[in-house]
Amino acid sequence: MTKPRALVLTGYGINCDYETTQACETVGFSADRLHLNDVFEKPGALFEYGLVVFPGGFSYGDDLGSGVAYSSKIRFSDSGNGDRLFDMFMDYVQRDGLVLGICNGFQILVRLGMLPAMEYGYGTQQVTLAPNREGYFINRWVELVVQQDSPSIFTRGLRRIRLPVRHGEGRFILPDEELLQKLERNRHVALRYCDADGKATQTFPRNPNGSQNAIAGICDPTGRVFGLMPHPEAAMTLYHFPDWMAIKERAIRSGETLSTTGDGHAIFKNAFEYALRTGS
């Protein structure tokens, strides 16, 4: 059986592409790293893949704001045959393709209007990811609670997970309360920052950036486009966790069987199983 294929975009300062490619391959994808310019030159390349990932990594140095320049390059550039690259990405989504945006990739998807696409309004920016409320770069592990009514393909079967964040502009905000309620009502929220009891929190540092309603990740109406600020590719194995020795010791003392896969593994695995099931 042919393996589902994953495309990991790179170029212009993205620096989590190798880890993300490895994460895709770990769960079963045949994964390729491809510079955005190569997508320009090969207009049909997108449609060869069941998953397209926008990784993290400070594209264009965040000089104009996180994800601004990279998303503008996609929105306003023509492909090798004269088609608009942005239209190609929109077509890819309409063809049941999976799209994952991590950190800077999430920021890019938001600015492209691929997320949250409330009421299927693809192409129009509806939310933003602003500078962290504390005013500085945050690099720490956070606990997350999964929104059980979310249609997100990537978070199916998950309840509580732990992933690292590392960003300076991750505060999820909307321009008014009405839009926030619409986002909630239409089940776009997939992940929230939570406290030790698993309850969504606005308290720093468990909510590291001050995001409204503790929102850490969202999806489009189909659940096939997903963006999150935490890094699942950096939590693929137990040994990525800073306290893995303590976790292992607790399991030994309690007689539990210890899984060596990390919480990020399940996010990529869900994508792989969907691509395998749908033949994409």
Image (cartoon, rainbow, N blue to C red):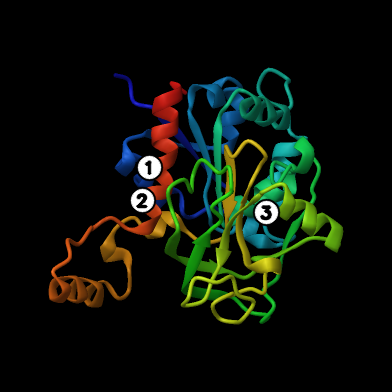
Provide the residue designation for mark 2: 265
Q: Which of 154 and 37 is in front in this view?
A: 154
Q: Which residue is drawn at 54% across and 77% down?
A: 206
Look at discs 3 and 2 and give the one toward the viewer: 2
Which quadrant: the N terminus?
top left
**Image check: 142 left or right of 27?**
right
Q: What element carries label 1?
A: helix
Residue 186 position within the rendered picture, expressed as x and y whole percent measured from the top left: 72, 47
Q: Which residue is drawn at 61% across and 81% down?
A: 203
Residue 37 position within the rendered picture, expressed as x and y whole percent measured from the top left: 59, 35
Q: Nearer the viewer, residue 130 or 57?
A: 130
Sequence-earlier tag: 3 or 2 = 3
Provide the residue designation for mark 1: 269
Q: Residue 67 carries which label?
A: 3
Q: Is mark 2 on a helix, strand or loop?
A: helix
Residue 222 position within the rendered picture, expressed as x and y whole percent measured from the top left: 63, 36
**Is disc 2 in contact with disc 1, using a CB cutoff of under 8 Å?**
yes
What's the amino acid at mark 1?
Lys
Sequence-earlier tag: 3 or 1 = 3
**Is disc 3 in contact with disc 1, using a CB cutoff of under 8 Å?**
no
Look at discs 3 and 1 and give the one toward the viewer: 1
Tell me if residue 18 can be seen. no
